[in-house]
Amino acid sequence: MTNKSQSILFAFAAVALWSTVATAFKIALEYQSPDDLLFLSVFFSTIFFGIYVIFSKKTKFILPKTIDLAKSALAGLINPFLYYLVLFIAYDLLPAQLAQPLNYSWVIVISILSIVVLKQKIRAVEFVSLCFGLLGVAVIASGGKLIYDTNYSALGIFLAIGSSLLWGAYWILNLKDSRAVEIKLFWSFLFGTIYIFIYRGFSIPTLSPEILLSSGYVGLFEMGVTFVLWMKALQLSQNNAQIGMIVYLSPFLSLIMIHFVLGESIQVTSIFGLILIIGGVFLRRFIK
């Protein structure tokens, strides 16, 4: 099998797993609170990253310098601690079909931060693509109505969109850290686990088979194994931009799973809003 074929295979495997996580979040939250899910899933993920780094042939497991530990401490505060805490609460308050596409507004946030923080020049097509994305968020959040639909939690919508802001901040912070990605993830997740333990008042959740299985799935396939698959896809690819576009299949596949597994009746506005958000990305990528 060629490197290109392997790259595509890894990419689709990652996308297939990411497509399950919105459904997995909702199932896991049936058995436990958002902060219980946060603690256990991040704990499982930290263990996975630690094992991966130890057995990785390309990465040496060494104690970082003080400045790198400080970067990881800040990164871990944002992700996984704040990002997943906010995201899990949003999923607890909203239908999955609403929380999932709203969280995907991170693609808009990163574009805006690239302009504001990184001082990248904005072209006309990029401005139009941002407008598409913002319109998509508005359509999803409002349910297609001109006024807010009180059937949805306002706090949930605020947190789902807010999670994308946290992800954007984490993305900017990572750009300024030149260490290997898996090393950065291990240390940020280790610090995140510590923050979560303190946040919980130094307590651990009550455990059951359902809680362990659902939390383990979220920790491994949202935060851990899937990342490694995606990293392998990018490493083997000769065109990361093309491979990168595959990830945008995930939210649409996720809506299908949300419908058939959770039994949610998918609204047209959820699909249309998501098309606007992802369409804006494609517009910016393909129009020079």
Image (spheres, rainbow, N blue to C red):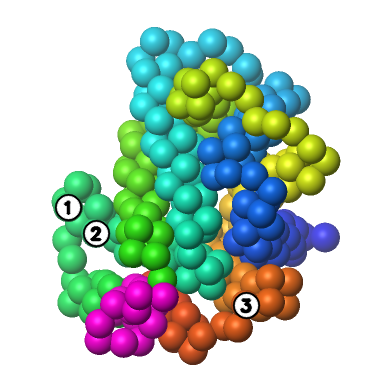
Say which amino acid is labelled 1.
Val
Mark 1 neighbour density, 10 Å: few (under 14) some (14–19) many (20 or more): few
- What residue did someone put label 1 on? 116
Q: Which mark is residue 264?
A: 3
Mark 3 neighbour density, 10 Å: few (under 14) some (14–19) many (20 or more): some
Q: Quadrant of residue 139?
A: bottom left
Say which amino acid is labelled 3.
Glu
- What residue did someone put label 2 on? 112
Image position, residue 70 (x, y; %): 37, 18
Q: Nearer the viewer, mark 1 or mark 3?
A: 3
- Above-or-below relation of 148 to 96: below
At x 58% / y 22%, what residue is drawn?
Answer: 203
Image position, residue 230 (x, y; %): 63, 52
Q: What separation in Å lies between label 2 and label 1 (alpha carbons)?
A: 6 Å
Residue at the outermost front position: 150
| Residue contact between numbered discs 2 and 1, judged by CB atoms under 8 Å | yes
**Is 189 placed left or right of 75 in the picture?**
right
Q: Which mark is residue 87?
A: none
* Front-most of residues 263 and 165: 263
**Is 208 placed left or right of 123 in the picture?**
right
* Front-most of residues 151 and 111: 151
Image position, residue 75 (x, y; %): 40, 31
Give the number of callouts. Answer: 3
Q: Give the magenta-colored segment's residue range.
A: 135-151
